[in-house]
Each structure stands twice: as structure tokens, then as C-alpha cells.
Amino acid sequence: MAGSSALGPVLAGLSDIRGWQEDFYRDLHQHPELSHHERRTAGKIGERLSRTGFDVHDGVGNTGVVGLLRNGNGPTVLLRADMDALPVRETTGLSYASTATATDASGNEVPVAHACGHDLHVACLIGAATLLANSTGQWNGSLIALFQPAEETGDGAAGMIDDGLAHLIPTPDVALAQHVLPAPAGVLGPCSGPVLSAADSMRITVHGHGGHGSMPQATVDPVVLAATIVVRLQTIVSRETPPGETAVLTVGSIHAGTKSNIIPDSAELQLNVRTYSEQTRRRVLDAIRRIVSAECEASGCPQEPEFELFDRFPLTSNDPTVTDRVRRAFTEVFGDKVRTMELQTASEDFSDIPSAMGVPYTYWGLGGIEEEAYQRAAAAGRISQDVPVNHSPKFAPVIQPTLDVGTQALVVAAMAWLAG
């Protein structure tokens, strides 16, 4: 593989950074910050990048950080990590577990934890950026280390674009990213084509005519209407989506009324939809509107239902050529630890950045669960019960070999371009 002889000197520096990198990770894990509030995290990142020789732009998209390292003529590679945490109370029992709290958008104090692994993503990218900065004699081109805020709210990537990201950096030749997953630590999972679903949340308000619970004949009951809608919506996937296409439709919230003997005037439903093609996405969203409107008409509602889309995430669809190049580079270094990542019904906003700039990209999975624990769960047929998944209060990647492999993976993928 072109450039493989240059990898050795770059990766040889891993043992020199491992100590402070692990401490950096533990510090981030103990000090999580919610979306759009990643100021301490951003400060730590900017300080480390500046010390390593990067030109640093902070405050991009509010709290985003972008480091640029120019090293002669050659390709430009963008490596991205997300920074934000979740309103979750950590129950991992780790010595460095988070006990942090913060005030959410509603003014409530909530627990905060890195229950999705973004702290590991940051530590891996800081490590990869350092290894490449310390080995500039082995590669040529420009390296962009991009640390994105607010992935969990789905608007952090777009916020960086709207804040002029494209004017701060040279246009990349390729954009690369990874995400830690509940798979054996050390495993890497590239996948060509669609890999993470598009996501759309929808808030629906249906209007009835309230009254006394003892006199339903004098009302239009929005609770019964909401229940009917929930059942009918299930047919969109089971009866309207072709077997070869994937779609998930979940009604996660229904709210109506205040008391057992009062029929309310309205009911609110919140839905979440996951799809892997724009065609399926449109079909499902259109079907939701059609079914809800029809059920409201059948119930004699006094006014039309209201629909609001929010928390929308783009489809993540990996460029086949870029993915193949990364896979070959991974296979040469990691051997049989390279697997094909299955389709994930999770969603990401990373692709908003390369898509806005017309840049091909690929995004791979990184295993983070201790190998023996994973295999025990697999042997017992209890993976879904015993292996914590992202967003679980028990989710925390085992530091090693996850941190080493994640750092190496970013270097190996970047060097597939930068080393010629």
C-alpha cells in the first residue's frame, strides 16, 4: 500500500502519548458538558492543539474548535470528533465516573454524562493530531482536526457551516470520522453506502372537543383518537414499506388531559422515524400526515391537526471509493479486527459538514466493550441484556485497547491520503 512504510514512524509515537492521553480522556469523562455548552472541553482541546503546532480557530458554531496544520503540498484531510454529553446520570461505578450536573434548556438541573462516548472520540483525535504533528517528515498536505459541538441535538455540524467553516479551512479532499459502539474493543467496522439512518422527530397535536368524562357523547375525545392513530401508524412499516427497505417508526410520547373524569380538548403525540433513503423518508412522513388527517376527519375533529418536524438528522451514506481505500489501509494494519459494520438505526449529523462542502466521506464503527465481557454475553445469548449500549447510564468504553485503536485508526485513515 502506498505510504505504508511511513506509518511505522508515525504510530511509533503512541507509547509516548499514551499516559497523558488516557489522563486527558478521564478528565473529559469526569467533566461532561451538554450540547452548545462545551466550553471547558473546547478550551482543553484548543490548548492542546496550539501546543502541538496547529493554527486554532475556536468558537466556530458557538463552541466548535478547528485546528489546521499545513505541511507542504498535498491532499487535505479532515478528521472530526464530536464533543457533547447527555443529560444522563452515570451508573458505571468507574473511579472517574461523572457526577456533574447542569441546567438544561428548560431551566431544570439535570445530571450529565458522556454516555455516548464522545469524550473518547475527542481523546482519539487529539492523540492522532499529535502523532501526525510530531511526524511531519512522513507525510505531506494539510490536516484539519475538527471538534464539533451539539451532535446530540443534530444542529452542531450545520451550526459550524453556517458560521463560515468553509472560509476558515481549505476544502478537504476527504472527511473521516468514527464512533465507538457496543462491539468488542479493538474491532473496526467500515461500511460502504448507507450506514446510519436519517432521523426525523415529529410533534403532532390533534384537536378534539372536551367535556365531562361521564358524557362522552357530547365530546370529540382526542385520547381515543390518539390511541387509534398509534395503532394505525404501525401499518406504515408493516404494510406500506417494501420488504427490501428499512424503516422504523416509534411513538415515544403521548400527552393528554389532567384528570380521570375530564375529556381534554387536545392530545399531543411525539414520533421518531428512521430511514435509509430519501424516497423512503418522504413516503413515511407523507403517510404519517395522511393517516393522522384521515383519523381526525373520521373522528369529526373541529380543526385540522398540527405537525411540527424537529431534531432532524441527515442520512450517513459512506462514499464507496473512500470507504474501500480506508478498509484496505485498516486491513493492512489491523488484519482480522476489521469487520463490516452493520446498518445502524442510530443517527448522526457529521455528514452535514462534508455534504455542504461537496466532499466525499466515510464513517466507521469502533468497538469499545471489553473483549471477555462481550464474549461471555455472546456465549450466553445475552448481548442485548448484558452489554450496555450508547446512551445507557452504564455505557463507558474500556479505555484500552479502545483508545489506542481509535487513535491509530484515525492516523491510518488519514495517512492513506497524506502519505501519497
Image (tube, helix red, strand yellow):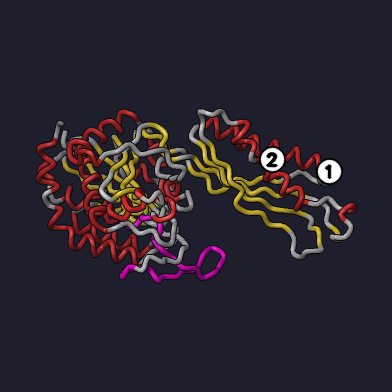
The local crowd at label 2, few if under 14, some if 14 to 19, many if 20 or more residues have their Cα within 10 Å, is some
Assign a secondary structure to mark 1. loop
Query: Image quadrant of residue 171?
Result: top left
Say which residue label 1 marks.
Answer: 300
Residue 244: x and y in percent read 50, 28
- Residue in view at x 24 percent, y 42 percent: 337
Which amino acid does the dot numbered 2 rest on? Arg
Q: Amino acid at mark 1?
A: Gly
**Quadrant where the C terminus is found in the figure:** top left
Q: Is residue 327 left or right of residue 247?
A: left
Residue that mark 2 sits on: 232
The Cα atoms of the two marked residues, 1 and 2, are separated by 17 Å
Q: How far across and how far down the image is residue 111, in percent?
A: 46, 68
Q: Which residues are magenta?
A: 94-122
**Camera-nearest residue between 97 and 112:** 97
Q: Earlier in the sequence, mark 1 or mark 2?
A: 2
